[in-house]
Image: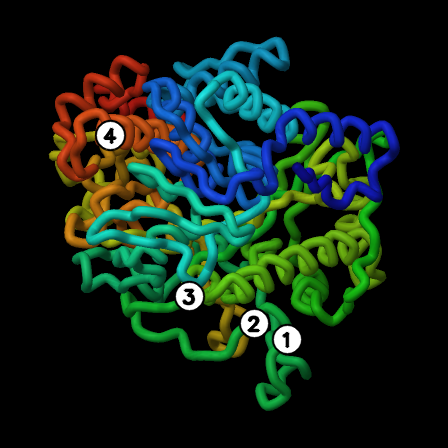
Amino acid sequence: MRITIGNTKRAPLKYQIVITLFLCCYMGFSKPDQDLITKDICILGGSEAGFTAAIQAARLGKSVVLIEPTGHPGGMVVEGLGKDIRFGSARVIGGIAREFYIQVEQHYGLEADFENPAWYSKYEPSVAERTIEAMLAKEKNILLIRKTRIRETNGVEKEGQRIAKIILENGLEIMAQVFIDASIEGHLIHFAGITTETIREGNAKYKETLNGIQEKNTFRQFQIKVDPYLIEGDPSSGLIKTVQPGALGAHGEASKFIQGFCYRMCLTRDPDNLIPIEKPENYKSDTYEIYKRYLKEGGTLFAPYPNRHNGKTDVGSWHDLSANLYGENWAYPSWDYKTQDSIVQYHRDFTLGLIWFLQNDPSVDTATREKWQGWGLPKDEFLDNGHWPRRLYIRSARRMVSDYVITEYDTHINNRDTISDPVAIAWWPPDMHHARRIVKDGYAYNEGFTHVGDSKSWKPFRISFKATVPKKNECTNLLTPTCLSSSYVGYGSIRIVPTFMVLGQSTGAIAALAIDKKMDVQDIPYGLLQEVLTTYHQILEIPRNWLEIISSNN
């Protein structure tokens, strides 16, 4: 057995020892000795949903293999994202997700306050990771395979409408009775021939109002005028970095451009736990020309501040100008691994370069530099990846298209919730970040942000069991808790860490029941599923006073 530790050269010796011991205890296999593994359930993607699906299936007596390409199960929970509970959404976090939040709060000597609309957990990524690793290790029926992914060519073998086997890049073959795609990218459902969508469909397809091109955007829009041309005032000179060519288009038309990705930056100012940001080898000051002009015109940029335990940050990006790279990611959902990897690398290089720029470039004003100076990478986080998150925050990728599609209709406050087979509660407004940065009226313009934060416009809704399963004529032993059947707008209300955790647990239960009852996943009687989910403390009903809860925290 070979365990690959990864890049720890920047860590002090004591941290190298810590990570080595940690990985030796928990890394599992890079490639097991045997070439074929047979389990009851195979889960591709150790995301927020992947680890809960594995635990639930194991608790129902099923043997599980969980495959996590980064080597670190937990998804964005362990990759820097911290504040993903808002609007009182903690009220509907049950089951294994609730166990997780209780345990991370206990680490800090605190209690999780799910009844408080303003409560959210401020855990550090490393604490979340240790909690999840311990939860997985406690279950005896889970085999965890790390640092490999499904083979891009001929990675799925089907017999009729059933997946018989998947093949990983390391050569390992896995047979199972039921498969779960808990990745964000949706590689398994795609390779299995399931119908998927990646674009903003446009309003007409599902009779929506928030999909497709947004003709007028005021939310997170530039509040100052920024010249987008290489030579200011000269359109013939070309465009500066982060601005894309192309016309705005008509409101509501379909668009290949999707909401921007970013890294959730976990930084620290603790001098005993800090590694300074180094100037990237491929750094070019001109890459950040738009930031120079923004500041020159009097703009105020986002900045880090301590918002999690031990003085660390969760620096997100949703501002008019931040680390979101609008328009730079449209190829990610549907292109090949090489393209996806290059987009991830570009975001990493850009973001580290942006931090260095804001801390050091003479064009940055003193006030902005002072806000960023002194922040660095934490020695005790992401030890095998140069203390930088392993995963880019992929906000939207492939979405399954099944017999039931979650749309804007489900989210709107005026529409009655008629779902009779809930497997989770979505408690988040339609929330899709800008998708492009173009030129409008001679200046830089962000297009695509839709955030319905007004409590009079959106409502929590129950997520249908049918949205987790593909059409029966496409596959009968496959589920997904992360690439649900939904429109671009519908997905904007689902793509939240706690919701994924809850959905993962539910799909783990569905998979186990399909094996017990020798049924296709689509045919599980909901009454039976509801009984299992309730037994394992899932919350499937919306509180009667939900509007009061949202309004008090809006």
- Mark 2 or mark 4: name the one nearer the start of the chain: 2
For numbered disc 1, what is the local secondary structure? Answer: loop
Q: Are marks 3 and 1 in contact (CB under 8 Å)?
A: no
- Examine the rendered structure and indicate whether residue 10 appears above or below residue 167: above
Q: Quick check: 187 left or right of 30?
A: left
For numbered disc 3, what is the local secondary structure? Answer: loop
Circle 3 Cα neighbour tier, 10 Å, few/some/many (<14 / 14–19 / ≥20): many
Seen from the viewer's position, the closer of residues 349 and 10 is: 10
Write down the residue under mark 3.
257
Type of amino acid at the residue the image marks with label 1: Ile
Write down the residue under mark 1.
240
Type of amino acid at the residue the image marks with label 4: Ile
Type of amino acid at the residue the image marks with label 3: Phe
Q: Are marks 2 and 4 in contact (CB under 8 Å)?
A: no
How far is mark 1 from mark 2, CA to CA? 6 Å
- Examine the rendered structure and indicate whether residue 488 appears above or below residue 78: below
- Residue 243 - label: 2
Q: Quick check: 177 left or right of 325?
A: left
Q: Quick check: 509 left or right of 229?
A: left
- Mark 4 or mark 1: name the one nearer the start of the chain: 1
Write down the residue under mark 4.
515
